[in-house]
Image: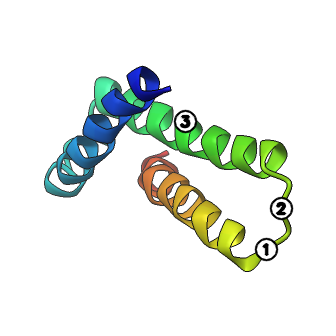
């Protein structure tokens, strides 16, 4: 498990500043759109997997799932605005 989780611990904090500082460039290039689309789908899939696999109806579980839904929306909205 740590081998799978450790790289993600570096990817997500690294993608945040890239998305914020290159906000105008990412949706304007094909590579940027693919990167944003992948990150949105990954976060959406992660959120759905968390809800499906961790079937605990508790406010703390929903609070853990909210950042993935929010992250997916923040990555996908610029794509919708460009197309």
Taking depth in this image into account, of 35 and 78 the one nearest to the observer is 35
Comes first in the chain, label 3 or label 2: 3
Q: Position of residue 20 (x, y in %)?
A: 21, 57
Residue 7, how many percent across, how many down?
32, 28
> Are the residues at dot 3 and dot 1 in contact (C-beta closer than 8 Å)?
no
Query: In this orientation, does residue 28 appear?
Result: no
**Label pair 1/2, CB-CB below 8 angstroms:** yes
First in residue order: circle 3 vs circle 1: 3
Which-is-in-front pick, marks 3 and 2? 2
Up the image or down, 77 lies above or below 50; here it is below
The image quadrant of residue 29 is: top left
Q: Could one spot residue 43 in this view of the protein?
A: yes
Element on which disc 3 rests? helix
The residue sitting at 26% across, 52% down in the picture is: 16
Give the alpha-carbon distance from disc 3 to disc 1, as whole Å: 24 Å
The residue indicated by pointer 3 is 42
Spatial CA distance of label 1 from label 2 is 6 Å
Closer to us: 36 or 53: 53
Q: Residue 54 at x, y = what percent? A: 78, 50
In screen coordinates, is 26 left or right of 62?
Answer: left
Residue most extreme to the front: 2
Residue 79 image offset from top left, x and y in percent: 46, 47
Q: Give neighbour class at mark 2: few <14, some 14-19, many 20+ (Cα, 10 Å).
A: few
Taking the spot 21% from the left edge, 42% from the top edge, the residue there is 14
Residue at mark 2: 56
Label 1, residues with CA under 10 Å away: few <14, some 14-19, many ≥20:
few
Looking at the rendered structure, the number of numbered marks drawn on it comes to: 3
What residue did someone put label 1 on?
58
């Amino acid at each position: 498990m740590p081998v799978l989780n450790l790289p993600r611990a570096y990817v997500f904090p690294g993608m945040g500043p890239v998305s914020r500082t290159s906000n105008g460039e990412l949706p304007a290039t094909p590579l940027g759109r693919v990167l944003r689309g992948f990150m949105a789908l990954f976060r959406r899939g992660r959120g759905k997997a968390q809800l499906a696999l961790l079937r605990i109806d508790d406010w703390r579980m929903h609070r853990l799932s909210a950042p993935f839904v929010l992250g997916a929306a923040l990555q996908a909205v610029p794509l919708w605005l460009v197309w």
